[in-house]
Image (cartoon, helix red, strand yellow):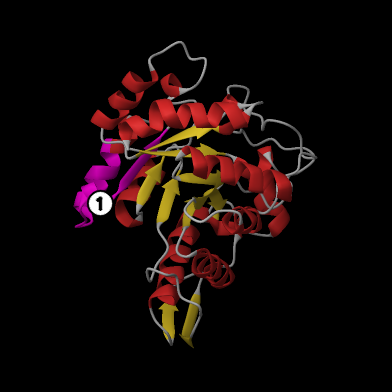
Amino acid sequence: MKFALHFGNNTFPDAAGASRLARLAEAAGFDSVFAVDHVVLPDAYESVYPYAAGGRLPGTQFTAMPDPLIWMAFAAAATTRLRLMTGVIILPLRNPLVLAKQVATLDAMSGGRIELGIGVGWLREEFDALGVPFAERGRRADEHVAAMRALWREDSARFAGRFVAFEGVTCNPKPVAGRVPIIVGGHSEAAARRAGRLGDGFFPSIGAQVDTMPLLELVRRSAEAAGRDPAAIEMLTGCPGALPGSGQDPLAAVEERRRRGIGRLVLPVHAFMPDLEESLPRFGERVIRAFA
């Protein structure tokens, strides 16, 4: 079982905080730290945030939320083993050629420690501000994944799609392993099917106002239908019972997730605050080492 912390960049938005969190997480035995993404936040919006009961984003539009890739670069520079993941980047809002270059560069310079968590977004007003059609975001995301993988896989790459097309172009450096793991995030059946069809993992975002556990089986069925091995797709979920102050046996809670085929547990960093120097090592000693 692996353990991850979210969300690093909006909890510790400065360079010193990024380095502090990354070093403490690595020392405690955490596998990874996630960074969340919004390019811009509108002053007013009617879209419903699906990961809180009130349907509104925590904080305000004035809350600092550094670009996840740049924040991850600071965290990677402060560590040697810790993996960093976008959790999640809003893929339809990004130019896939530029993003492929950025992610591959970060992966190469970190020694292969980068994962790309992707989502299709929920905030229509953000799409409007960037001039990207909201209704086509799912199909656009699928093409972006295929286009990036083509650039990572080979030189003189080509791709022909509805939204992205190129031929005879090369993007270097390449990722360390020849590709960057793509973890599909989301709380919908469409997200689960996308993960089964093309993802290296599935992260049914924590806080969704629906039961996301049934989506795990949909991922597996979709993988089989696509001719893929369902066991090769990593499943990531939360685990409230493992958190400090939950009143539950954390070892039993983690074991229950393990029996359900979960490979990585994603825990909110705020549950370990304010004294990270004490709480993260304690969790590592009591829980992480028990499942090493």
- Decide which of 169, 250 is in the foreground and name it: 250
Q: Secondary structure at mark 1?
A: helix
Residue at screen point 52% across, 54% down: 137
Residue hosting label 1 = 232
- Decide which of 136, 3 is in the foreground and name it: 3
Residue 15 at x, y = what percent?
A: 72, 50
Residue 78 at x, y = what percent?
A: 61, 54
Look at the image and tell me in which quarter the N terminus lies: top left
Q: Is residue 226 magenta?
A: yes
Residue 107 seen in this snapshot: yes
Q: Residues within 10 Å of mark 1 (few under 14, many from 20)?
A: few
The amino acid type, in three-letter code, at marker 1 is Ala
Vertical position of residue 260 compared to residue 161: above or below: above
- Which residues are the magenta region? 217-237
Residue 266 at x, y = what percent?
A: 46, 36
Residue at screen point 31% across, 54% down: 197
Q: Is residue 251 magenta?
A: no
Residue 141 at x, y = what percent?
A: 48, 58
Vertical position of residue 39 compared to residue 12: above or below: below
- Decide which of 250, 135 is in the foreground and name it: 250
Vertical position of residue 39 compared to residue 266: above or below: below
